[in-house]
Image (cartoon, rainbow, N blue to C red):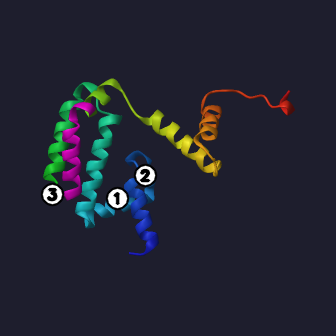
Amino acid sequence: MSGADWRRVRTALRSAFEKLTDTQHAVVAKLRRLRHRIFRAWELKEALRDLYRIIDPVHAAAYLKRWITRAKRSRLRPMIVLAGTVQRNFDGIVAAVELGLSNSVVEGVNGRVRLIQRLGWGYHSAAPLIAMVHLCCGGIDVTLPTER
């Protein structure tokens, strides 16, 4: 398999089912026929995504228990390890689904802070970086003299 082929497969496997192009659908169908273990891992990934996307929060606990069972029986070592992690954090995951909680806002702010840090390379202390974060993320509108 060439590098370009591998990139196509990797992109298809990382993409959400509903966002797959026709070419990516063909790649997944080929994996289903030729690489059963990889396809099974992809199916488990998509099933776990469904917990947040389409499963009614009332049924989240039962759905997650079934997913853990499927993952442990898959005989795929990474999925078995993931199922163990999910099982250890079961109550928190179910609570997050039922309450509609997500850390996406925090991750977004974290990404912006890292971008500000990269753009302002060379801060001599934390104070200027903190000031830039407050300026960029704090909702402060600064009117420049040229904009009056």
Disc on the earlier residue, 2 or 1: 2
- The residue sitting at the bottom extreme is 2
| Residue 87 belongs to magenta span | yes
- Residue lying at 64% horizontally and 39% vertically, measured from the top left: 128
Q: Which residue is mark 3?
A: 75
Mark 3 near mark 1, Cβ–Cβ under 8 Å? no
- Residue lying at 27% horizontally and 58% vertically, measured from the top left: 39
Instruction: Name the side, left or right, on which 23 lies relative to 121.
Output: left
Disc 3 crowd rating (10 Å Cα; few below 14, some 14-19, many 20+) is: few
Where residue 41 appears, as percent x and y from the top left, is 26, 55
Disc on the earlier residue, 3 or 1: 1
- Viewer-side residue, 54 vs 65: 65
- Viewer-side residue, 132 vs 25: 132
Task: Magenta stretch: give its range.
Answer: 76-92
Q: Which residue is mark 2?
A: 20
Q: Secondary structure at mark 1?
A: helix
